[in-house]
Amino acid sequence: MVDTEQVYDYVIVGGGSAGCVLANRLSQDSSVSVAVLEAGPPDRNPLLHIPIGIIGLMWSKTLNWAYYTVAQPRLANRRLFWPRGKTLGGSSAINAMCYTRGNASDYDHWAALGNAGWGYRDMLAYFRKSEAFEGGANEYHGASGGYAVSRGRHNNPLNEKFIAAAQACGYPRNDDFGGATDVGVGLYNVAQRDGRRCSNADAFLHPIRDRRNLTVITRAQATRLLFDGLHATGVAYRDRRTQSERQLRARREVLLAGGAINSPQILLLSGIGPREEIEPQGIELRHELPGVGRNLQDHLDISVIDRERTRLSLRLGFKFLFVDAPLALWHYWRHGRGWLSSNVAESGGFISSTNDPALGDLQLHFIPTIEQDHGHRLWNTIRYHGYTLRICDLRPGSRGHIGLNSADPMAPPRIDPNYLDDPQDLAQLVAAVKIGRRIMRSPPLAEHREVELEPGDTVEGDTAIEDYVRRRAETIYHPVGTCRMGHDNMAVVDDRLRVHGMTGLRVVDASIMPTIVGGNTNAPTTAIAEKAADMIIADNA
C-alpha cells in the first residue's frame, strides 16, 4: 500500500557524488522542483568530516553499504569487500579524498568511441567549473566551484622519502596531478576545506539546502521505477524509518545517480536489462537492454608493506591511544591540522610499467602506516611501525557484471568483478609488485626499512608473486561502467545519458563510463554530473 505520493519536476535517485551536483544545478531555477532520494542517513557523524575518520568508516554498517563480491576463482576463491558510501555525499563521504582526474587520453577515447562532447577539452571545462582550488584559477583549475581542493594539512616525513625513492628509480616529481600531466609522483591534492573533508554533499548540497524548491529525503531506498509504457514517471521507495512504501512522481525526468552498483540494480528490479537476469527472479521484463549491469570495471590493487625501524610512521600502540591521540584531537580542534587531518594516502602518483612518458598504467598510494585488508586487520598496525605502498592496475582488461540475487529490493545485488579474467591483468600486478619493491628498497626510503612484511622476503619469482597476488589483491574502490554510454547494442545510455529505448530516464554517475579512467573516480563523476546538468537543462528548455 502506498502511503503518499508527491510530484516534482525532477526526481534524483541517489544523494551521492553525482546526485548532489544535480540537485544543486537543477534547483538553481526557482521555477523547477527537485527531489533527492538517499537510502542512507544524513551525514552528521563526525567521522565523515574528520579526514582520518576514514579508518572507522570502513567498519560502519550504517554509513557504508559494505558489499561483498561473489567468490573470485582467480583470487583464491575469496569474496572481496567493496565499501560504498551510504549517506549524503555517497562514496565521496567515506573515500580517501585524493583529487585526481585520470589521463586526458581517457576522455579522448570516450569521444573516439562516438560519444560527442566527451573529449578531454570538453570535460576540462566541467572539472574547472566544479572546483574551488586552493591555489587559484588557472588553465587547469577553477576557483569558484563548490568542490574544495587543497594541499593536505598533514605530511608525514616518510612521504618525501617515498617521493625521493621513486625519483631515484627514474620517475619524475609531479606537484599537481590535475595539471598539465598526471604522470609522476608527489603529494596528492585532497578534497578538503580547512582540514575538514569536503564531500560532494559539503560542496554542492548543504550550501543550498534552504532552497524552497529542493526536497532531500534520507533513509529512503528506491525499490523500483514507475512507468507509463516506456516513459519513466517516477520512483517507488521504502521509507526505512516506517518500512512503508511511498512514491515520487516526476513531471520531467527521473535521474538515476546510485553509482555503478545501485543504478543497474534499480534498472534490473524495474524490468530493464538482460532478459536472462530479470525473468529468473520473477520480475516482468519491461524493456530488454542487454548491457545493463555488464561492462563492470575496477582497479585491482596489490600492496608492498615494510616494517619501519625509525618510528616515523603511525602505529596504533599504547602511546598512540593515551598520549598522541588526545594531543592530536586538541591540535585538530584548535587549528584543523595534525594527523587527524590526514587522508591516510598522502602521497603517490602515476607511473608507466613500459616507460611511456605520457601515460601511466599503474597508480601508487603511499600510506605511512601498516594497512591490511582495508584496515580490518589491525594487529600488525598495533604491534609495529611500518608503511604501505598500494599499487593498482589502471587499465584492466577484465570485465564483470552486476546482477540480482533476489527480486527483493532490500537484498544486496550480485557483484562479480571477474577479476583477472584477462591474463594480462595478473602479469601487470606481478610487474607492480616488482616496481613497488624497487621503490621501497631505494634510498632514501630504504634507510627506514626493517623487514618486508608483505609479500615477505621469501616471495621471489613470478610464480610466487602470482600466488601472493591471488591471495592478497583487493579493490581500490573504483567500480564503473555498468550503464555504459555509447551507441551499440550493449550500450545503456546515449551520449546525453538518456536510457536507450526509453523516455524520461537518464543515468548520471560513474556507471556511464565506457572505459575506466586512469585514476581516482570521484572528480570524474563530479564532472560527469556537471555536464549532465547542463544537458538536462538544455533538453528541457
Image (cartoon, helix red, strand yellow):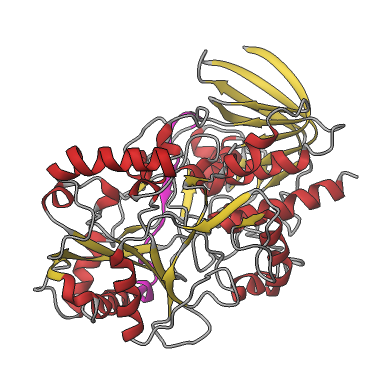
**Can I make out residue 291 in this image?**
no
Q: Position of residue 203 (x, y in %)?
A: 61, 44
Could you tell me which residue is drawn at 68 percent across and 43 percent down? Answer: 287
Q: Main secondary structure of the magenta part?
A: loop
Could you tell me which residue is drawn at 43 percent across and 83 percent down? Answer: 172
Q: Is residue 411 magenta?
A: yes
Q: Is residue 243 above or below residue 21?
A: above
**Can I make out residue 197 in this image?**
yes
Could you tell me which residue is drawn at 23 percent across and 54 percent down? Answer: 314
Q: Position of residue 106 (x, y in %)?
A: 59, 71
Left or right, 43 with respect to 18, comes to left
Left or right, 352 with respect to 180, comes to left
Q: Is residue 242 above or below residue 288?
A: above
Q: Position of residue 394 (x, y in %)?
A: 45, 69
Left or right, 113 with respect to 279, comes to right
Q: Quadrant of the C terminus?
A: top right
Residues 249 and 434: in front is: 434
Q: Is residue 423 magenta?
A: yes
Q: Quadrant of the N terminus?
A: top right
Q: Quarter of the image holding residue 267?
A: top right
Q: Is residue 514 above or below residue 61?
A: below
Q: Position of residue 45 (x, y in %)?
A: 44, 30
Residue, far right = 541
Could you tell me which residue is drawn at 47 percent across and 28 percent down? Answer: 410
For the magenta stretch, what is the residue range?
Answer: 407-426
Residues 378 and 503: in front is: 378
